[in-house]
Image: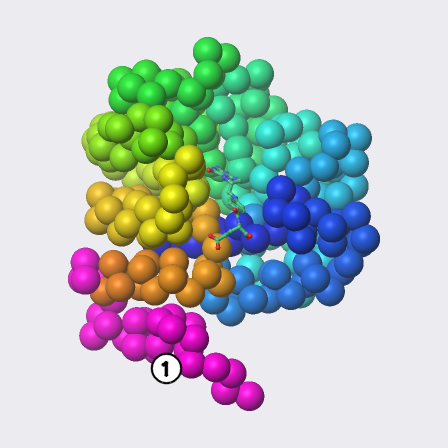
Amino acid sequence: MIIIGEKINGTIPGVKKAIENRDEQFIRDLAVKQVEAGAHYIDVCASTAPEFEVQTLKWLMEIVQDAIDTPLCIDSPNPRAIEQVFKYAKEPGIINSVSEEGGKCEVVYPMIQSTRWQVIALTCDQKGIPSDVQARVEITKTMVQKAQQYDITPDRIHIDPLVMAISADNQSLLNFIETLKAVKELYPTIKVTSGLSNISFGMPLRKIINQHFLTIATYAGMDSAILDPCNRDILTTLLAAEALLGRDRYCRNFSNAYRKNKIGPDRGSHN
Ligand code: THG
């Protein structure tokens, strides 16, 4: 599983405060901890008022890149903001995200043409987020065909089917899996991604639901996930699922993570 660490996000109250106070150490720690926990990409999302977004993203990117060598996942609903901060990235990462809404592909695709950047493509358009499989597949086709015009191959695209809350749509996970299968049937090298938390919205014991979602989606073939790798329960679930699915030779990853006290109940500091 490709892990995109979600913790540097201005929607989290502590992060919002750190952004307001320009607390570099707080952001730096979040970057380092996520990388130590196994993150392959570090999501940076300002979530500030639009007039501060570019300067905030730039500040976050600078701190993260100074602290660690892991590539970024630049998270903004505004492709023009992404366009302005793109040049400050030291190495290719992931653009989060485009969709079939508001000409986003037309801004982002030319920008990442002839680069090794990847892109997350949300299956929504001006009509909103479809919950049925066929509409999601159709939006995917359009976004992949547009990408082809800029020589962006499917292996650089992570489709995010935007899972609905299971409390609102009982078929949400099953539809997600059906979408995943259909999309991979069409484009075998494409990636499918998801955030973990949408599925459990409006339910008690959300973290439990999120963990089970992760297990089932991993089995179904989800390639990447936007999650908190510092959450021990989530990391434990993920590594257990990968071991059980034959994706962890000799269960080495699982055992090493346990030995380093990264999974299971916290056995205290080794320092
Ligand atoms: N898809 C795509 N991008 C996304 C999302 C998605 N970006 C934003 C969001 N969803 C993913 N990011 C977050 C960030 C923080 C939290 C949830 C989603 C969050 N964090 C709590 C905290 O840190 O305090 C709890 C984390 C935990 O331990 O589980 O709630 O869906 N493409």
Residue at the farthest bottom position: 271
Quarter of the rendering containing residue 129: top left
Residue type at mark 1 is Arg
* Quadrant of the rendering where the C terminus is positioned: bottom right
Residue at the location (37% across, 82% down)? Answer: 259
What range of the chain is rendered magenta?
244-271
Q: In front: 88, or 192?
A: 192
User: Could you say whether the residue bearing mark 1 is in a helix, strand or loop?
Assistant: helix
Question: Where does residue 88 sit, x and y in percent of width and height?
Answer: 71, 47
Q: Is residue 119 left or right of residue 207?
A: right
Question: Where does residue 228 sit, x and y in percent of width and height?
Answer: 48, 55
Residue at the location (78% across, 41% down)? Answer: 55
Q: In front: 19, or 167?
A: 167
Residue at the farthest top position: 127
Residue at the farthest front position: 204
The answer to whether residue 183 is magenta is no
Q: In front: 40, or 110?
A: 40
Residue 179 seen in this snapshot:
no
Residue 250 seen in this snapshot:
yes
The crowding category of the residue bearing disc 1, from other C-alpha atoms within 10 Å (few below 14, some 14 to 19, many at least 20), is few
Question: Where does residue 76 sit, x and y in percent of width and height?
Answer: 61, 35
Q: Is residue 181 left or right of residue 28?
A: left
Residue on which the image places disc 1? 259
